[in-house]
Amino acid sequence: MSAACEIEGGERRRLRLRVRGAVQGVGFRPFAFGVARRLSLDGFVRNDSEGVLVEIEGARLTEFVDALRGDTPPLARIDAIEIDSIAALGLRGFEILDTLGGATQTRIPPDAATCEACIDDLFDPASRFHEYPFVNCTHCGPRFTLTRRLPYDRAQTSMAAFSMCADCERDYRDPANRRFHAEPVACPACGPRLSHDAGEIVATIRAGRIVAVKGVGGYHLMCDARNAAAVAALRARKMRDAKPFAVMVANVASIGLFARAGAAEIALAKSPAHPVVLVDSHRNLPETIAPRLSRIGLMLPYAPLHHLIFRAAEPDLPRDAPSPFALVATSANPGGEPLIVDDAEARSKLAAIADLVVSHDRQIVVRADDSVLSIIDGAPAFIRRARGFVPDPIDLGGDGPCVIACGGHLKATVTVTRGREAFVSQHVGDLSDAETFRFYRETIAHLLGLLGIEPEAAACDLHPDYLSTRYAEETGLPIVPVQHHVAHVAAIAAEHRLTAPTLGVALDGHGLGADGQAWGGELLHLDGANWSRRGHLSPLALIGGDRAALEPWRMGVAALDATGRLDAAPRLFGAIAPARAIVAALGSERRWTHTTSMGRLFDAAAAILGLSTRQDYEGQAAMELEALVVVPRTLDCGFELKDGVLDFRPLLSFLIDRNPSPREGAELFHGALAEGLAAWIAADPAAHGGAPVALGGGCMMNRVLAEDLARRLRAKGLVPLLARAVPANDGGLSLGQAAFARKILSQ
């Protein structure tokens, strides 16, 4: 019987509704309770292992179902409502019943920034939550980061350590209160406590010092973003020479003081996740915050303590007025280790960095960095996916085997599938660090336990030396290796639910190819569980192996060798002693491996243009090159295309011989890349007929290149698809591995 038939008519009947999605811990039960009371319906609502179960009885059932579908609480996400007609019981009243346990099929929503109503409470002297740094309700506050297991009830979270006072208990039990079953609810009388108040924090920061502050998903290191000496001290103590810092500003009005943000960027910054958003900088903050970059990462306060800090800094400013006070807010993870969440560890490891360590006694169960996004080609694109978005699943469009996909080695994540859902973990980091690998294992154990999943197989990269690959082997499960760049394309195909054969490009720094060589500029065709390499970039020598990724001058020398311009080496790299030795050795019998990597091509161009000889973080040379571009320019004959090989040696020759300014060179380089890539893709037979083209790999986080390439592909009648649900870089690999492995297992 259809839902429409079940709820037609005015006679008394009863329906059972199974609501699936992110519907626990988000105020869904009191919402359903309120709707039922308003419509004079009888029955009950309860949480259980599958989501929310509702039974309603009465005459106005259609209106109830419509309300569920169209007017849900802000944090709720409904995937499906299953409706069954059952016998009327004739009972009166509507109740919220206790949670039923069992094997869980539901999920926990991500953490959400403090809502406006709770901010009102925070600054209302008459509120019992006045200046309480842990105020929250069903519409906001921590969720994922404090949850040990499902169903999502207080006893399953780190708030179990705090017994509610009578006032909080009353709010918690009152269906008309917005804190009804808000599991983290607490107040100064019964809840967590902060070790130092906002006034002490601000005084320390105003004095030019550094503060470590325990937040929602881990500790932040904070200092005055306008104080160049403080920023320099933070860099020196954290041993972070050049990688950009994020900046927190007081409110939306304050964004314009520091950056040029469009409507889409402001909307993203204001979204419930309150992520870091990359925006064009006014360059009125110290250059050392984002050295040699044109954009800066800004975020709004997302925890009550953040709001208290900004109020303490500028107590006389109206709440929504622009504030000149701004904070560097960067993850507290010294030496490349994972984000610190433990108080004792913070005191020991951050003592040499922070002048003040501010903690609280609510345990962080799951560490989660701030998410970072950019608006690319008109829509949000992840740079890093973590707090505020994890563990929201990605709908794969259909059921399949349950797999665990172990990701890559850099920017590692893990994906677990359940039915048609793919749960991608928060950003873990680079697995070369022992502490990060421990965090990786911790993340897997928590995700599997939270979802109640026993995987049938483990997907991993082809590279045998990745620790993620070794972990997959340790599981004892059947192993499904997935080539690195296939996973990049498969991730985009999965999130866009492409079922037809897919053409895609994967442009990144490195990945082990099926032939054992270093790939990174690949044109691929995916067809079900099969794939083929349709083309690649013309290879360059990978001089020094892995060291080439750290020292762009090595790729610059490789470009000289590839173009027959070694005579230019003294002019370009004569001051680098190892470069002189390598140039001399290139004529000998010594042979280097080669790479088709787009990332290494960026390094070569940056070196030739004199921008970078050494990288302090991955992608630095490419990001600095992108930052110079105002408008990409076309270069006549900047590439050659033959038998699927895209050759940019003409472009490299131009940069070497003409010696353009860095800005002119950067604009010509980006324009030539986009033109060549578009021609390369369009020349493939699979591109005919307006087929969608998946654009993946870390180079697609370059806004200039991605937008210019997408524009050119549309002009050729093609449909470019960019990564939206996960990062285009290696942070999205695990999703692609999971999706492609399921196709292999389903053959």
Image: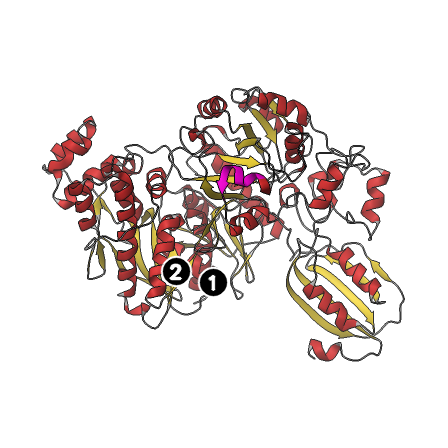
- Residue at 82% from the left image edge and 53% from the top image edge: 175
Towards the viewer: 498 or 135: 135
Determine crowd level at label 2: few under 14, some 14-19, many 20+ residues with C-alpha closer than 10 A: many
Measured along the vertical axis of the image, is residue 345 above or below residue 264?
above
Number of numbered labels in the structure image: 2
Towards the viewer: 265 or 418: 265
SS class of the residue under badge 1?
loop
Residue 356 highlighted magenta (yes or no): no
Determine crowd level at label 1: few under 14, some 14-19, many 20+ residues with C-alpha closer than 10 A: some
Q: Which residue is mark 2?
A: 694
> Label 1 amino acid?
His
Q: Quadrant of the C terminus?
A: bottom left
User: What is the C-alpha distance between the residues marked 2 and 1?
Assistant: 9 Å
Q: Which residue is mark 1?
A: 496
Magenta-tinted stretch:
254-260
Horizontal relation, residue 650 to residue 421: left or right: left
SS class of the residue under badge 2?
strand
> Label 2 amino acid?
Ala
- Residue at 27% from the left image edge and 32% from the top image edge: 613
Residue 256 highlighted magenta (yes or no): yes
Measured along the vertical axis of the image, is residue 669 above or below residue 42?
above
